[in-house]
Image (cartoon, rainbow, N blue to C red):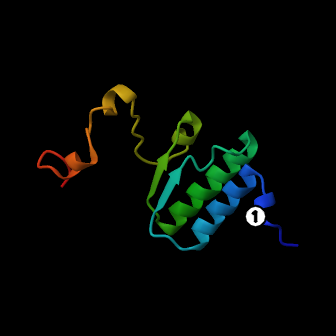
Amino acid sequence: GPRDPATLSGGQRARVNLMRTLLAAPRALLLDEAFSRLDADLRERMRRFVFDRAARLGLPVLQVSHDAADAAATNGIVLRLRPEQTKNAFRSHNSLWSKDGLG
């Protein structure tokens, strides 16, 4: 029967969240460490499932990960950011809207 969500493990919650996201018919996916709480075997299966599903549905995917295998599973552009490259990108949120920022 149904379980109280509070009794689910971190990995179980991660899978439920991924499935809920896919069932909601999103126009894009933002995966922020989406596979990090899964063991190696399940992690690989879930990565394959999510990326195959996204490809079939034509969903753009932005994945944030510290795991090289997660990045390698991406069928697209991989951008590797290092702290020394990003620490001065924007000194404050206000600089985002300055003439030199994005705004």
Q: Residue 82 at x, y = what percent? A: 39, 29
Q: Residue 93 at x, y = what percent? A: 27, 48
Counting the numbered discs, the total is 1
Mark 1, residues whose alpha carbon is within 10 Å: few (<14), some, or many (≥20)?
A: few
- In front of the other: 98 or 28: 98
Residue drawn at x 45%, y 64% is 28
Quadrant where the C terminus lies?
A: bottom left
Q: Residue 88 at x, y = what percent? A: 27, 32
Q: Is residue 99 above or below residue 57?
A: above
For residue 7, side relative to residue 76 (left or right): right
- In front of the other: 69 or 24: 24
Quadrant where the N terminus lies?
A: bottom right
User: Which amino acid type is shown beneath numbered disc 1?
Assistant: Pro
Q: Secondary structure at mark 1?
A: helix
Residue drawn at x 64%, y 57% is 49
Residue drawn at x 42%, y 41% is 78
Residue that carries the numbered disc 1 in the rendered image: 5
For residue 73, side relative to residue 102 (left or right): right
Q: Residue furthest right?
A: 1
Residue drawn at x 19%, y 53% is 97
